[in-house]
Amino acid sequence: QKEVEQNSGPLSVPEGAIASLNCTYSDRVSQSFFWYRQYSGKSPELIMSIYSNGDKEDGRFTAQLNKASQYVSLLIRDSQPSDSATYLCAVYFTSGTYKYIFGTGTRLKVLA
Amino acid sequence: GAGVSQTPSNKVTEKGKYVELRCDPISGHTALYWYRQSLGQGPEFLIYFQGTGAADDSGLPNDRFFAVRPEGSVSTLKIQRTERGDSAVYLCASSLIGTSGGAGSYNEQFFGPGTRLTVL
């Protein structure tokens, strides 16, 4: 069973702080990892993709990947109330099939 | 360019009826995915197409669910004899290539706005 796990939250952080979201996955051969943001009543929006170990930065977002430990994280710097949403981790599994498995999402609340 | 589109945005039906949900992927995307999302959950994989063929339909919950993509572009998810438990948001997503075992932006998957299905 291929699994992707996230803490459902809510994770509450004050405005301007760093929000740290974590995700673990079960399949060692996975090579592609994605973070989606989903506002209430909307569909998921891709915000970051990462393929190699280490950090990848895009604006206020940094994705971190550690394949040996099978985790991927998302840091949001200078958090804004508009960042309040559910953040979904997705892993692209390629052993036996080619599909994306999503975690249940972490709800982030940025307090003004 | 245009993103993934889905119609209808909302569908209310009665138990036992048949429904069709349509997805129009991003032009040029060969891989198309259907998901179902319930409140408080992540998207649950249903089926994925590579071109016209269903490459993996292991997520379809039972034989009341069926999907087609006859020309390798638009896809239709069909649900027969709907049940109240089928109520959910049905999401469609597409990506450039769905079969590569490697890494790259061609694996990035983009979602449509979804169809909210309510079975009364």
Image (spheres, rainbow, N blue to C red):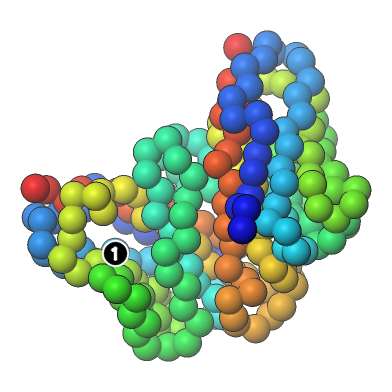
Q: Classify mark 1: residues with Cα within 10 Å, few (<14), some (14-19) or many (20+).
A: many
Using the rendered view, name the quadrant where residue A101 is placed: bottom right
Q: Is residue B2 above or below residue B100?
A: above
Seen as rendered, the residue at the extreme right is: B70
The residue shown at (47%, 87%) is A52
x and y percentages locating residue B37 in the rendered image: 54, 40
Q: What residue is drawn where x is 11% and y is 48%?
A: A111
Residue at x 42% of width, y 88% of height? A53
User: Which residue extends farthest front?
Assistant: B1
Q: Is label 1 in a helix, a strand or a loop?
A: strand
Q: Note whether residue B54 is visible.
A: no
Picture quarter with the N terminus of chain A:
bottom right
Q: Is residue B13 above or below residue A73?
A: above
Horizontal and vertical percent position of residue B12:
62, 17
Image label count: 1
Q: Which residue is mark 1?
A: A21
Residue B32 drawn at (x, y percent): 72, 56
In the rendered image, is residue A94 in sight? yes
Which chain is disc 1 placed on?
Answer: A
Residue A37 vertical position relative to residue A42 in the rendered view, above or below: below
B58 shown above or below B78: below
Identity of the amino acid at label 1?
Answer: Leu
Q: Dividing the picture into quarters, in which one does residue B39 lie?
A: top left
